Image: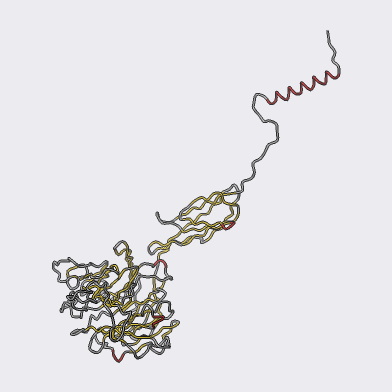
Amino acid sequence: MKTSRSPLQQLALAAAVALALALGACGGGGGSSGGPVTQPPPATTGSLAVTVASLPTGVAPALHITGPGGYAKDLTQGDTLTGLAAGSYTVTANSVTVGTTTYVPASAGQTVTVNGGATATVNVTYSPVALALGVSRYLTGLDAPVYLTAPAGDERQFVVERPGRIRVVQNGAVLATPFLDVSSRVYTGGEGGLLSMAFAPDYATSGAFYIYFIDANHDIVVERRTVSGNPNIANGTGAVEIIRIAHPTYTNHFGGQLAFGPDGMLYLGTGDGGGAGDPNGNAKNPLSLLGKMLRLDVSKASVTSPYLIPASNPFATLSSKRGEIWALGLRNPWRFSFDSGQLIIADVGQAAREEVDIVSATQGGLNFGWNVMEGTGCYSGSACSTTGFTPPVFEYSHGTGGVCSITGGYVYRGNAIPALTGHYLYSDYCAGFLRSFLYAGGSATQPTDWGVSGIGQIVSFGQDAQGELYMLSSDGSAYKIVKK
């Protein structure tokens, strides 16, 4: 029997069916709840990947990254930087120097945009550029130049001329009036002459400087002088003789340099007195001041007390040895210098070897072996005892390349040639080359011949107040060492 439904019942039934159908659509598959979909917020930070190529293993790049909000970071290797605010970033790459090779980035600066949720990439590629040195003629027309130096912080240079004059160089030009002229007192025969000068550490206030020359008696003389009211002219009077060393018989091997050490003491390098093989045995004789490195305290120099023997000198209290001696066993030290707490001496050999001695500047009493040793060899040619001798760090032999007499220089500490920093430069009077080595770990490393030639016999090196180096030639010129 068919039962009829009221309109209200029919409406309720339709609603129930619709609900069932909706529930059926949601069941079984675990699908969407049917509610609105919520999207995650967009990323606000990104990343920067920096890669480095073409540097030798173990050599670190020099990278600096800057970005929004004052962001700055240094990198010494490739890396990916994360969590960076979106914006513009600049990667600056600096050159890297290893030995005498400089690795130069293909691009010094690269700018990229970092977007949120993305990684930007910068590739830094280096290329090797080997250092090349040359010389530029700086001065001409000098009269036998033998030394060039400058007071600390001064833009001028002072050139010592062997006949007895010191010339001032200002803005690259030699002034007409000499700074000092003692030519009437200087013996210029043999290896004599006015051979060097040194400014006192307090020159800016005291005006004191010192000269090393050979007088008419062939004696080695060191004098203290002062500058006048004109900074380009020295006082002609008021000289104080600091020390006089007799040098009889021979007219060679006077040594010739004086310099202040880092300790404020005045050092003198004297030759052995001359004659082949040191016939008088001066270099090894502790009672002779010849063939030595001397160390004097001249801080209170006066006519009656020109110098004091520092208490720290190795023989200061021994009557059997001269207290002025700092080191002995030298043949003819032709230029010495100080660098990084070390004393560097270029000692001219007899007929077989030229040598460079490098020792702590605080270690006195060393014997460099002449005339038993010539470099690392026995001077007599037969076996000899090397006990008690300090061998050279570096030497080169005669017989090839026309060499004859080392001309010592300096460790480069200027700013113009960064790749040369720390390298010791030297030459040879006869060969006229420019060579260098790096002293590291107690040894001479990276020996380099820079291919310089045709500039005459190299008498000496010079160093200005900025640490730049010069070569003084027998042709009356001064050449500045430059990067090609």
Residue most toward the bottom? 184
The quadrant of the image that shows the N terminus is top right
The answer to whether residue 359 is seen in the rendering is yes
Residue most toward the left? 382
Q: Nearer the viewer, residue 424 or 132?
A: 424
**Residue drawn at x 19%, y 78% as measured from the top left:** 288
Task: Place residue 368 in its image quadrant.
Answer: bottom left
**Residue drawn at x 42%, y 81% as measured from the top left:** 156
The image shows residue 108, relative to residue 397, as above or below, that is above
The quadrant of the image that shows the C terminus is bottom left
Residue most toward the top? 1
Position of 186 with respect to 483 (left or right) is: left
Q: Nearer the viewer, residue 166 or 120?
A: 166
Position of 417 with respect to 84 (left or right) is: left
Total numbered labels: 0
Position of 468 with respect to 269 (left or right) is: right
Task: Give the percent coordinates (x, y) of residue 19.
Answer: 75, 23
Task: Place residue 251 in its image quadrant.
Answer: bottom left
Q: Nearer the viewer, residue 176 or 9?
A: 9
The image shows residue 437, relative to residue 64, as above or below, that is below
**Residue drawn at x 15%, y 69% as measured from the top left:** 381
The answer to whether residue 458 is seen in the rendering is no
Task: Give the percent coordinates (x, y) of residue 347.
Answer: 25, 73
Task: Give the percent coordinates (x, y) of residue 173.
Answer: 43, 84
Task: Place residue 302 in its image quadrant.
Answer: bottom left
